[in-house]
Image: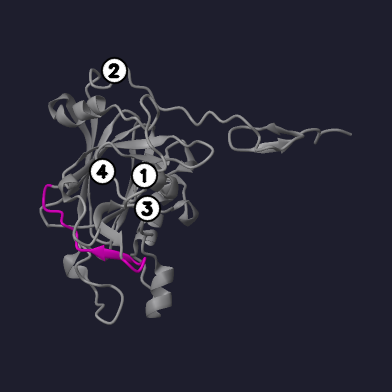
């Protein structure tokens, strides 16, 4: 649209100015990495896993065919620091691809991960304004299902993610807005959200570099590749288009990460204009003089 520009423009040397040479090497030098974990997530389920800082993680389309995945990510040591989709949309865009970052919540506001490779980067923008790897849409959930269909279904992405994180001491309240990997979405001329069938094929992948120690969780969406509607007059159970997703975690060669260091939290040190308070650990404030007689 004429007369408009991005609100957050990267300046040379700023945190938005990604070192493409560094991340490009991580993507290209696959012979200098060691596979340390791999697994497959079955249909209509979820799994959580750790990715240490400085490692690379790849989410793959299996030979069975296209499948959409709902992704959550936290700081492994502090789940209050987790993906902030709205700020990521502002800083990066409504959809992400190579060299984009996922940003964490306040008061940390730093990269959780950087996308290093994306075999669907070619998709770009389609004739309807659709793009792939979506930060617009919410995860499907059983509460909306009950509201629309009047029935209970326990394998929506929200429930899959909830079950996945329980072994890590997290609960439903920790599950948050998602990155929809391999999902094509957009906003139509009426301002309505739309979804389209995934263009992914066997062997396609979405890969990222962990900027911190991460806890990740992924749900294989019960809508599968989104080629069959789950809602509306033509809705039916799309189980025949549900397929697994695979995950691989790699340790890059030390020469590839030389000079890299995890990003530090945002530098704001104020107290939001509050007086008579003291800082009691990052993200919390306590009143002064509470122990006075």
Left or right: residue 64 compared with residue 221? left
Q: Which residue, given by chain and number where applicable, does mark 4 sit on?
A: 97
Q: Nearer the viewer, mark 4 or mark 2?
A: 4
Q: Which residue, given by chain and number where applicable, does mark 3 sit on?
A: 178
* Mark 4 or mark 3, earlier in chain: 4
- Give residue 10's position: percent from left, percent from top: 37, 33
Main SS class of the magenta portion in the image: loop
Residue nearest the viewer, comparing 152 with 266: 266
Q: Nearer the viewer, mark 4 or mark 1?
A: 1
Please say if 199 is above or below 90: below
Q: Which residue, given by chain and number where applicable, does mark 1 sit on?
A: 5
Cα separation between marks 1 and 3: 26 Å
Which residue sits furthest front?
3
The residue positioned 56% from the left and 31% from the top of the image is 268
Label 1: element kind = loop
The residue positioned 37% from the left and 24% from the top of the image is 13
Does the image show residue 76?
yes
* Mark 4 or mark 2, earlier in chain: 4
Are there few (<14), some (14-19), or many (20+) residues within 10 Å of tag 1? few
Q: Start and end of the magenta stretch?
A: 189-203
Residue nearest the viewer, comparing 136 with 170: 136
Please say if 110 is above or below 85: above
- Give residue 173's position: percent from left, percent from top: 49, 55
Left or right: residue 73 compared with residue 124? right
Please say if 80 is above or below 163: above
Are there few (<14), some (14-19), or many (20+) residues within 10 Å of tag 3? many
């Amino acid at each position: 649209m004429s007369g408009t520009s991005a609100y957050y423009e990267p300046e040379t040397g700023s945190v938005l100015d990604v070192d493409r040479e560094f991340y490009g090497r991580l993507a290209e030098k696959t012979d200098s990495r060691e596979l340390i974990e791999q697994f497959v997530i079955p249909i209509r389920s979820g799994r959580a896993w750790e990715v240490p800082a400085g490692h690379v993680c790849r989410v793959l389309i299996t030979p069975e065919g296209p499948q959409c995945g709902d992704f959550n990510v936290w700081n492994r040591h502090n789940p209050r620091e987790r993906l902030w989709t709205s700020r990521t949309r502002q800083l990066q865009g409504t959809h992400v691809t190579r060299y984009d970052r996922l940003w964490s919540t306040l008061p940390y506001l730093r990269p959780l991960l950087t996308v290093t490779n994306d075999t669907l980067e070619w998709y770009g923008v389609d004739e309807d304004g659709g793009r792939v790897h979506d930060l617009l849409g919410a995860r499907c959930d059983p509460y909306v299902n009950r509201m629309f269909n009047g029935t209970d279904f326990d394998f929506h992405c929200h429930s899959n993610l909830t079950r996945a994180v329980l072994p890590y001491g997290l609960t439903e309240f920790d599950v948050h807005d998602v990155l929809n990997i391999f999902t094509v979405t957009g906003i139509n001329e009426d301002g309505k959200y739309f979804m389209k069938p995934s263009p992914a094929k066997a062997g396609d992948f979405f890969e990222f570099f962990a900027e911190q120690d991460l806890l990740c969780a992924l749900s294989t969406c019960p809508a599968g590749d989104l080629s069959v509607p789950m809602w509306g007059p033509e809705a039916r159970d799309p189980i025949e288009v549900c397929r697994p997703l695979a995950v691989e975690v790699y340790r890059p060669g030390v020469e590839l990460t030389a000079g890299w260091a995890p990003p530090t939290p945002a530098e704001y040190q104020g107290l939001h204009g509050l007086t008579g308070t003291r800082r009691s650990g990052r993200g919390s404030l306590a009143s002064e003089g509470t122990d006075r007689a």
